Image (tube, grey):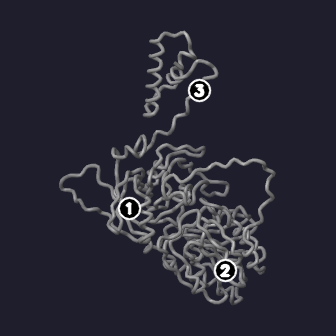
Amino acid sequence: VAIRRHQGASSADSMRQKLTVCVLVHCAMALRVSVPMHTAASVCRCNRVKCVAEMPPPRPEAFIGSTFGSNSAMFYRQGMLVLEDGTRLRGVSFGYEASVSGELVFTTGMVGYPESLTDPSYRGQLLVMTYPIVGNYGVPEDGEDEYGLPKFFESDKVQVAAVIVSDYSHHHSHWASRRSLSQWLVEQRVPALYGIDTRLLTKKIRAKGALRAFIEFAPSVSLGNDDAQSSVGFEDPNLRNLAAEVSVSKPRVYGAGNTLKILAVDCGIKTNIIRSLVQRDCEVELVPWDTPLLPLMEGKDGLFLSNGPGNPANLDVTIGHIKAVMDAQQAGTAPVKPIFGICLGNQLLGMAAGASTYKLPFGNRGQNQPVTNLLSDRCFITPQNHGYALDATQLPENWTPLFQNRNDRSNEGIMHATLPWFTAQFHPEAKSGPSDTSFLFDLFVGVMSEPTAPVRAALASGKYEAPPPLPLTKVLLLGSGGLSIGQAGE
């Protein structure tokens, strides 16, 4: 009827033929069968000028797994997730097919999977994403920014051992997307499963703590005399020195020639931490995790202790080098210079001061962790990724807790009473997550210019003052509720 109304004097048979071909063309497009563009344009387009509609550009063809969605997953390669408590969950592969073991942890972030998967702090971990739909905006291209850093990622490769999601989006759309998440994981040789009950896994981890787990894939062809036993077993990656695995092997300099000189210990530093410092006119010399620091502090304006994966107790060499710098400055044999640590850096500075760490039951990983500034009682929403915490009750005299997690009351930062040494267990550089605490970089830069100035008042004041509001009259707020039960909390 619509075709007749618009195109007028054609026979019924001709209209019926055109309608039939139009339906077939659209079905072929849905199946991603190659259709000549002139065929689609000539058959499925009204001839009237105001009704002309251009065909959308073709999408990338390299999708691994189901063509329509998770409902047809039974026809594609599957893998088994095995937990140390005996739980076995079958899922569909959308990554590299190789058996792998590690520590099963979860993150509650809704977005930012390119940044999270390349975060060195996730080294050795099988990452469960609680958000139900992952992969819908693809993965951006590789490349460096003006500082020589990865433009879209937090390191030069995917760091997680494997990825576990509820539903993988086979079709992606974003202006910066150059490939699907599946393609990227295959390139990076990282296994991934979807069709897994991630809510069940999250509840297990919350009840029992982080679990050892492994993923195994059955061979495509199994002969009768094959050994049916799995070749992969449970492994605790925290027994390894993970920081040594992700640290640079030789010094690197970023922002060469900038005004302030920073010595940064690389235990798994994120790209955006370096970028945040370079953007503030800092030259960052990045050194390996086990580098003696005191001889290199001459000519430097500050010391930075990076984030990183694993058990901080494995880094006794690094802790000893940090303590040597602190002892020299306190004894007066070296000038006092600011020290700033993030995440693992918080634990390392605390252990160098004399405290110890302990393993959290299931860690704090996500983008919405509430943290209180104990000096001002102000609360910040922070991105986090750690499985260990500093026992602030063991801090010696002249040290005090600075931040505290509002959920589990674990330590989120410390400070020295008189010297410009302070830390944050959370990630003020974000990527991904809110940047509400990025003022800590400004504070670090400020005290490097005046190392004898008191920092307590600056830390207590917290975030910078907000600019005056714009003279808006109407605001359109767009959003949605949780996509499934248990997701609305985000």
What type is the residue that disc 1 sits on?
Answer: Val
What type is the residue that disc 2 sits on?
Answer: Met
Residue 202 location (% of width, % of height): 45, 63
Q: Which of marks 2 and 1 is nearer the N terminus?
A: 1
Q: Would residue 243 be visible to someone looking at this image?
A: no
x 51%, y 26%: residue: 37
Residue 23 location (% of width, % of height): 45, 25
Residue 260 location (% of width, % of height): 74, 69
Quadrant holding the C terminus? bottom right
Is disc 2 placed on a helix, strand or loop?
A: strand
Classify residue 279 as left or right of residue 224: right
What type is the residue that disc 3 sits on?
Answer: Ala
Neighbourhood count class around disc 1 (C-alpha, 10 Å): few under 14, some 14–19, many 20 upward? many
Classify residue 300 as left or right of residue 202: right
Q: Earlier in the sequence, mark 2 or mark 3?
A: 3
Of the residues tagged 2 and 1, which is closer to the observer?
2
Distance between mark 2 and mark 3 Cα atoms: 62 Å
The image quadrant of residue 48 is top right
For residue 100, which numbered disc appears in the image? Answer: 1
Distance between mark 1 and mark 3 Cα atoms: 48 Å
x 55%, y 63%: residue: 366
220 w.r.t. 355: above or below: above
Instruction: Give the labeled residue for mark 2.
Output: 415
Of the residues tagged 1 and 3, which is closer to the observer?
3
Instruction: Give the labeled residue for mark 3.
Output: 53
- In this view, the residue in front, 181 or 187, is 181
Q: Which of marks 1 and 3 is nearer the N terminus?
A: 3
Of the residues tagged 2 and 3, which is closer to the observer?
3
Is disc 1 placed on a helix, strand or loop?
A: strand
Query: Pointers 1 and 3 in contact (CB under 8 A)?
Result: no
